[in-house]
Amino acid sequence: MNVIGTFKNWRSYRRTVTELGALSNRELDDLGINRSEIPFIARRAR
């Protein structure tokens, strides 16, 4: 993978972590997401 592709993947990961991390525990529960699952979910988001 090239540098640009790696950077885009990292940026997408960080954006997802930031957005999900900003949600309250209740909002995450409504989505069926546990706070500890955020990094795993962010890695899958592309």
Image (cartoon, rainbow, N blue to C red):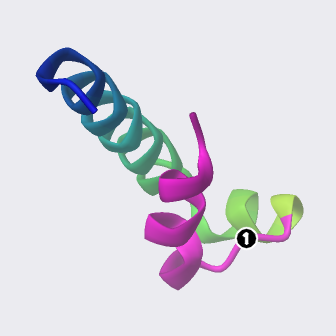
Q: Amino acid at mark 1?
A: Ile
| Residue sitting at x 84%, y 58% | 31
Q: Which residue is mark 1?
A: 33
Residue 2 rendering spot, x and y as whole percentages? 20, 24
Residue 45 placement: quadrant:
top right
On the rendered structure, is 35 left or right of 32?
A: left
Q: Quadrant of residue 1?
A: top left
Q: Position of residue 44 (x, y in %)?
A: 60, 54
Say whether residue 36 is magenta. yes
Range of the magenta residues? 32-46
In the displayed structure image, the side of residue 35 where residue 8 appears, left or right: left
Q: Is residue 33 left or right of residue 25?
A: right
Residue drawn at the location 40% of the way across and 31% of the way down: 12
- Which image quarter holds the C terminus? top right
Establish if 40 lies above or below 9.
below
Instruction: Residue at 43%, 67% (x, y): give it.
Output: 39
Main SS of the magenta segment?
A: helix
